[in-house]
Structure formats: C-alpha cells, structure tokens
Image: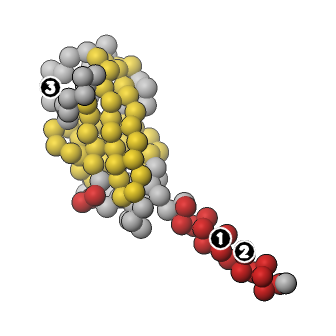
Amino acid sequence: MRTLALVISLLALACATAASAHAFPDNSSPHVGATIATVPKMVKVWFDGELEPVFSTLVVKNAAGAVVSLGKGEVDAKNQALLETTLPKGLPPGTYTVYWSVVARDGHRTAGHFTFTVK
C-alpha cells in the first residue's frame, strides 16, 4: 500500500511539473485592454518562462483583421522571456489585437490574444 501511495505521489508531482512548464504572459506593453493616447513604437509581451525564438510569434492586427505589425515578432536576445514586435508610425486610432503564439524551452506551445485601443 505504501508503494502504491508513493507511485501515485510521484506521478502527481511529475504531472504538476510538466503542466507548469508552459509559458504564459506575465505582463505586456501596452497592457491588456489598455486605452492609450499615442501608438507605441513596439508591442512587448513578457512571459513567465524562456521562449524558443524560432517557434514564437507576435503579430498585431487592426479591427479589419489586417496585420499592422512589422514582422512576426522576435524574442529579445538579452531576455529570452520577452517577445516583441515593431509598429509603424502613423497608425490611426482604433482597437488593435495582439496575437501571440510561443513555444517554451521545454517544447510546450501556448497561444492567445488581447486588445488595446488607441484614442
């Protein structure tokens, strides 16, 4: 009986460790749901773990669904938990959606999106 309890405990610990390995957003600039006065030069999303640069993307789309960001995003060379993309000058006011898709260093993929509004 003790052996069975030990095996179950070890399996539970292994599953909890694997589940916590996914990379999820920790912070962003602009913030999720923010209303800002001017278009930022960059959109940045910080994650709670390091990312695989080759498999991680960040794009910004306008309300019509057109991509407005320049490129597909890059993981910062000095901070492997930071994914960022550049925005062009002169974007009009409106609501923009940030789409991210990342692969954590352990190979787990997560994805999501959020919006911000420019007055």
Query: In the visual, does 4 lie left or right of 95?
Result: right
What is the three-letter code of the residue carrying label 3?
Lys
Q: Is residue 70 above or below residue 109?
A: above
Label 3 and label 1: CA atoms lie apart by: 49 Å
Find numbered disc 3 in the image and state the secondary structure of the residue it sits on.
Answer: loop
Query: Label 2 crowding class (10 Å Cα cut-off): few <14, some 14-19, many 20+?
Result: few
User: Which residue lies at the image location 54% right of the left edge and 60% below the top edge?
Assistant: 20
Q: Is residue 39 above or below residue 105?
A: above
Residue 101 in percent (x, y) is at 34, 49
Q: Is residue 117 above or below residue 77?
A: above
Q: Which residue is mark 3?
A: 89
Which of the two residues, 64 or 54, is positioned nearer the viewer here?
Answer: 64
Instruction: Indicate how the structure is coloured in the image.
Output: secondary structure
Find numbered disc 1 in the image and state the secondary structure of the residue it sits on.
Answer: helix
Residue 25 in percent (x, y) is at 44, 45
User: Which residue lies at the image location 39% right of the left edge and 37% below the top edge?
Assistant: 113
Residue 39 can be seen, yes or no: no
Whether tag 1 and tag 2 are in contact, CB under 8 A, the answer is yes
What is the three-letter code of the residue carrying label 1?
Leu
Q: Which residue is mark 1?
A: 13
What is the three-letter code of the residue carrying label 2?
Ser
Name the N-terminal-most of marks 2 and 3: 2
Label 1 and label 2: CA atoms lie apart by: 6 Å
Whether tag 2 and tag 3 are in contact, CB under 8 A, the answer is no
In front of the other: label 3 or label 1? Answer: 1
Query: In the visual, does 58 lie left or right of 87?
Result: right
In front of the other: label 2 or label 3? Answer: 2
Task: Write down the quadrant of residue 68 in the picture.
Answer: top left
Q: Which residue is mark 2?
A: 9
